[in-house]
Each structure stands twice: as structure tokens, then as C-alpha cells.
Image (spheres, rainbow, N blue to C red):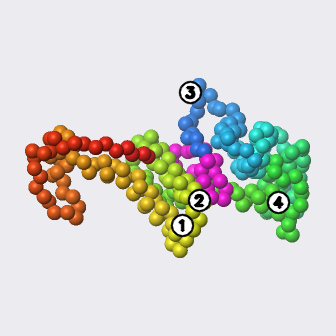
Amino acid sequence: MPTKPAKYGIKSWVAWDAKSSYAWKMQVYTGKPTSGCPEKNQGVRVVLDVTEGLRGHNVTCDNFFTSYELGQQLLKRKITMVGTDRKNKPELPPALPASKEREVFSSEFAFKPNTTLVSYLPKKNKNVVLLSTLQTDISDREDRKPIIILDYNRNKGGVDNLDKVIGTYSCRRMTACWPLIIFHNIIDVSSYNAFVIWREINPTWMSHKQNKRRLFLEQLGKALVTPLIERRKQVPRTEPSAAVVKAIPSPGAPDQPEDPSTTATSPARASKSKF
């Protein structure tokens, strides 16, 4: 995908919060079904899957997903939708896709119950069509840009911002193993979600510091590895394993001889760690 910062990779469908870029649900795209036939109405199916469990929200999506059918399905779940629509959709009135002989910055509207369509002309002979089940009025600003356009522009960049923030601080490593790539991405997204939740619960946390997310990830990493470090403090029961552990000098501490007679009988302690 030449227009994207990450031009190749594994694609996933994501439902995200437009304000914080919190990832609500992700679904890895696995290609064609096992039957070998292309999936029909994939955009509708994907949006319904990733919005499962949401109520009272508004979904912003691009023209791959947007359709009148999807808007009606989401309304049944108490979810509204705003999205760009493809001009070749048979559901569009003939007057909306047309752009010739129209004035620049002009808008054409069409209405159905609970649904509004708008065709906006930002440049000569070039228009954009949007479908909305959220706004039902035709009022616009002094610059003649419809409210539907403004709402879409305000909420469309969440996924790109999510890719940006997890790319800044990431645990990813070079690998040709695709399951490991997905696992790295899960860790990156989960750690960012944890940061968003922590920031909402503790709004005054390190308010005077910059790079808060880097500091949060540093503390998070230490909290995750500390149980494992504590567990490895105990010398193993078997003599070969104990000899290996004792052969590794502790950082910042001088080497001290150990009594081998106490190694085999020293008790072991197990601790529980969570990830």
C-alpha cells in the first residue's frame, strides 16, 4: 500500500477510540475463506464483528466498509455511522455521484428515514460522497462545508495515530515468523491500551514530565519481570542446575565461595507470576 507508512505487512481490522486511539477490538485478516471463494459483504461483516458489545457509539469508517445496509444493521444495535461512500454504489441516487457543471464547495443532499447522504464538491469536477445515520440536518458553516464532512474529518485518523504511537516505542524485532509478528503487535497494542487506561485513572501522574508513555512502559516492563527475577533468586535443587546459577556472578556483588554440601539440600521456593 504505497500511501501508507507501513507499505506491507499483516493486515488487521481494528475498532479504535477516535479521541485516545484506544483499541477496542482487533481481528487479523487471514485472506480468502477456506472455500476459496471471495467473501461477500466483507465490510459489513467486519464492522459488525469489531463493534460487538458496543452501544450508544458512533462508528466512522471509509468507503470499503460504508453501505446503507451496514448503517441499518448498526442502528439495530443503537450505533450510528458516518463514512465515505463509493460513487459506483447502486444504492446512490444518480444526482449525487455527478460532479460536472456543479459549483465548487456546493453540496447535494438525499434523505431516507434515519439516513442522510451528501455529495460535497471541494474541487472542480471532484466530489466526495458521505453517508450518515448520525446527522439529519443540512446546516453548514460559513465556508459551506457540511457538518457530516467536519465530523468525518475529526474522527477518521485514529488507526493511523495508533500505528504511529506503537511504532515510536515498540517491542518488535526482525523476524520471518508471522505468528511472532502478530504476538509483538498484540504486546504493543496492549501496552498502549494500558497506558490510556492508566492516564484516565491517574490524570495527574507525572504531569510535569515529558515522554510519559516511555516512562510508563519502563515501569510496566519492570513490574512484569520482577516476579521472574524474584523466583530465580532461589538456587535450584539439582546440583548441575545449582552449579550453573552459582557460576554466574551477581551484578555489583563480589564473588563468594559457596558450600557445595548445602546446595543439594537447600529448599526451593516457587512464586506465581502473571502476564
Q: Nearer the viewer, residue 267 or 78?
A: 267
Question: Badge 4 is on which residue?
Answer: 147
Label 1 sits on residue: 205
Q: Amino acid at mark 2?
A: Ile
> What is the number of the mark on residue 34?
3
Which element is circle 3 on?
Answer: loop
Quadrant in which residue 105 is drawn:
bottom right
- CA separation in Å, label 2 and label 4: 33 Å
Residue 4: x %, y % from top left: 58, 55
Q: Residues within 10 Å of mark 2 (few under 14, many from 20)?
A: few
Q: Position of residue 44 (x, y in %)?
A: 71, 38
- Residue 103 horizontal side relative to residue 217, left or right: right
Camera-side mark, 3 or 1: 1
Report crowding for label 3: few under 14, some 14 to 19, many 20 or more residues within 10 A (C-alpha): few
User: Between marks 4 and 3, how big is the CA–CA gap?
Assistant: 43 Å
Task: Tell me the quarter of the picture where residue 45 sits.
Answer: top right
Tag in front: 2 or 4: 2
> Which residues fall within the magenta stretch?
1-24
Question: Tag 1 or tag 3, which sits nearer the N-term?
Answer: 3
Nearer-the-camera pick, 19 or 92:
19
